[in-house]
Amino acid sequence: MRIDVLTVFPEMIRHALGISIVGRAREQGLLTAEAVDLRAFAFDRHRTTDDAPYGGGPGMVMRPEPVFAAVDSVVAGSSQIASEGRDIILLTPQGQVFNQRLAAELAVREHLILICGRYEGFDERIRDHLPTRELSIGDYVLTGGELPALVVIDAVARLIPGVLGSDESAEDDSHTSGVLEYPHYTRPPVFRDWPVPDVLLSGNHALIRRWRRERSLERTLARRPDLLDSCPLTEDDRVFLVSIGATRFAPAKPATRERSRRAARAP
Ligand code: 9WO
């Protein structure tokens, strides 16, 4: 996969792309990722990428010419990629909210162009004619799109085959499995009077698997009950959820008349 990040602060992107799993993926040739300086595509005397808003008012607006010229240049430099394999993404608080499903969608694209704005906003002609998608990473305003671009790159890169080692597999992630992760522990067995749960030291792998699943379900019910409505639940999961008071997850087909009488009595 190839990723180009268009920004007036390329150093912010370059530094982050050299580190950790994304840095390793680039060294291994699994990912090509580059920062493109928008100022290099500003051809007025002062190389400006912003200007005052028509109609007046405070703040500055991102001019369209440098952004279109930078996209044209990056597209020309990757002419072996068909336009269907490319996504041009604007990072703004008004975009569709990014999530794991979108990360998986982007991870199978050949070329991502991420456009980072600064100032008070983009000239609307950028938004109208350039992006194939507009993405937000959450409901807050930042000083620019660079950190959101890095968030998207991080989430996407780890889904590219070979980027994570088998030990770091993305299969079990929260938001892939649909439930939150179970609690993790490592050495020491007791830290400041706080012991590791006995079951994890028991060596009984069936019991450990069940304990972890139940902690995942418990935590998801407490913190993100919305996730339980759209994740696959086994009969055992439902029985457990009902046992901790979540009666709305009662199994669809009660196995016995007695169980259905009990379910009918529950609040
Ligand atoms: C700044 C501002 C200042 C005064 C009044 C209104 C204002 N709006 C903005 C603004 O939205 N600035 C943006 C800064 C312009 C586009 C790039 N910037 C940005 C992107 N901030 N936050 C994001 C972002 C992107 C994706 N997900 C979350 C936040």
Image (tube, rainbow, N blue to C red):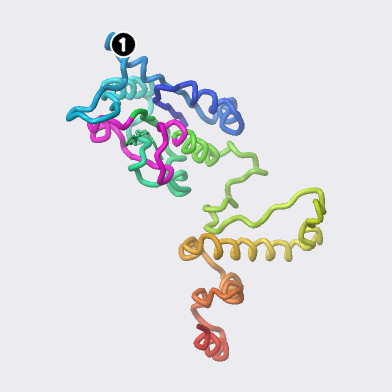
Q: Position of residue 146 (x, y in %)?
A: 44, 31
Q: Secondary structure at mark 1?
A: loop
Q: Position of residue 109 (x, y in %)?
A: 42, 37
- Please state if 258 lies on the left or on the right of 139 as rendered: right
Q: Position of residue 249 (x, y in %)?
A: 51, 74
Q: Residue furthest front?
A: 58
- Please state if 165 lies on the left or on the right of 188 as rendered: left
Dividing the image into four quarters, tell me where ligand 1 lies: top left
Query: In this rendering, is residue 221 above or below 89?
Result: below
Q: Quadrant of residue 93?
A: top left
Q: Residue furthest top?
A: 45
Q: Which residues are magenta?
A: 120-148
* Residue plotted at (53% across, 41% down): 159
Q: Quadrant of residue 98?
A: top left
Residue 146 falls inside the magenta stretch = yes
Q: How many numbered tags mark residues here?
A: 1
Q: Amino acid at mark 1?
A: His
* Residue plotted at (42% across, 27% down): 5
Q: Which residue is mark 1?
A: 46
Query: In this rendering, is residue 258 above or below 209?
Result: below
- Please state if 129 lies on the left or on the right of 31 as rendered: left
